[in-house]
Amino acid sequence: MMSEPQDTKKRPLNLAEYYLLTCLDHHGKLLTQSHTVRVGLAGAILTDLARRECLYVTQELVMVNSTADVDLEEPLAAVLQIMTDAPENQDAEHWINRFSRPALMDAIIEALQVRGDIAVMTKRFFGLVPRTRYVPEESYGRMDMYVRLRATLLGRDTALDASTWPLVQLLYSTDVLTRLFPGLQNKTVKERLEAFHMEAAQEEPAIAESLQAVENAMAESLTATRGQATGMRG
């Protein structure tokens, strides 16, 4: 049985919140298309639930761990409940496609706003078209995140960090990573991620499968819109 959810302002950022903060520039604009970010957020939620041992994730199916006893904040608790109530088990890509909806992104934005990590602002461009921006605050958590991301990419920390390397992989899969760190060589990034993925497949297989499902979902989405395959790892 699950314990009471954590207080939003006191708990650490979860993986989806880290991911969304990283997808914003300093003006509050998304670094890539909103649909792509929503796929990344759904994958981040799935990965975080696997990381907290709430889910068993294999290449074929995702199964809820009914014995897990952890504090889950929203929207993770709601997502897990939906998966628990499902009449049959589905694979990871199914759940990513199902949860990559505006409602999930709105819930994460609301949590970040309550924490004071972003300010939601609506402006009218040319006095006509309203545009909403999610302006990030320069918090310690946000700065620490960038430092850890860069260190991980440059190979200064070889540990299989349970939050940083999944975040790097999510950003890479959704084409945000090179926009954050344009100076890094893509070959170096791919080699670094390959090394992490091989290690994770042995030590954290549920997380590795969740992250792979994000790549697969993005590849299918790009194939459907462009009519061609991608060069992502299969």
Image: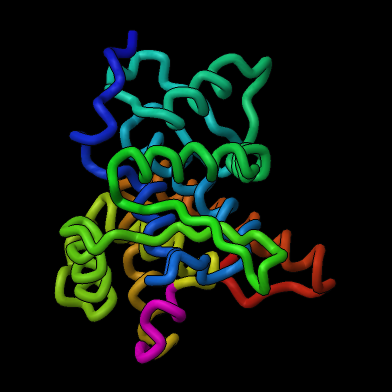
The structure residue drawn at horizontal position 26% and vertical position 50%, both measured from the top left corner, is 162
Give the magenta range. Answer: 177-184
User: Which colour assignment does the render follow?
Assistant: rainbow
Give how far across and how far down residue 225 sits, in percent: 81, 67
Give the vertical position of 116 relative to 22 (above or below). above
**Residue found farthest to the right:** 227
Q: Answer with left or right where residue 109 lies relative to residue 126.
A: left
The structure residue drawn at horizontal position 37% and vertical position 65%, both measured from the top left corner, is 168
Q: Visible in this render: residue 1? A: yes
The image quadrant where one finds the C terminus is bottom right
Q: Quadrant of residue 67?
A: top left
The structure residue drawn at horizontal position 36% and vertical position 85%, both measured from the top left corner, is 188
Q: Answer with left or right where residue 129 lies relative to residue 226.
A: left
Give how far across and how far down residue 30 sits, in percent: 52, 66
**Residue found farthest to the top:** 1
Give how far across and how far down residue 8 sits, in percent: 28, 32
Q: Quadrant of residue 14?
A: top left
The structure residue drawn at horizontal position 43% and vertical position 55%, both measured from the top left corner, is 20
Give the vertical position of 203 relative to 226 (above or below). above
Give the vertical position of 113 relative to 79 (above or below). below
Determine if the magenta segment contains residue 181.
Answer: yes
Q: Answer with left or right where residue 151 lies relative to residue 35.
A: left
The image quadrant where one finds the N terminus is top left
Determine if the magenta segment contains residue 196.
Answer: no
Give how far across and how far down residue 131 sits, in percent: 61, 61
Considering depth in this image, is 198 or 151 the residue closer to the camera? 151
Considering depth in this image, is 31 or 170 the residue closer to the camera? 31
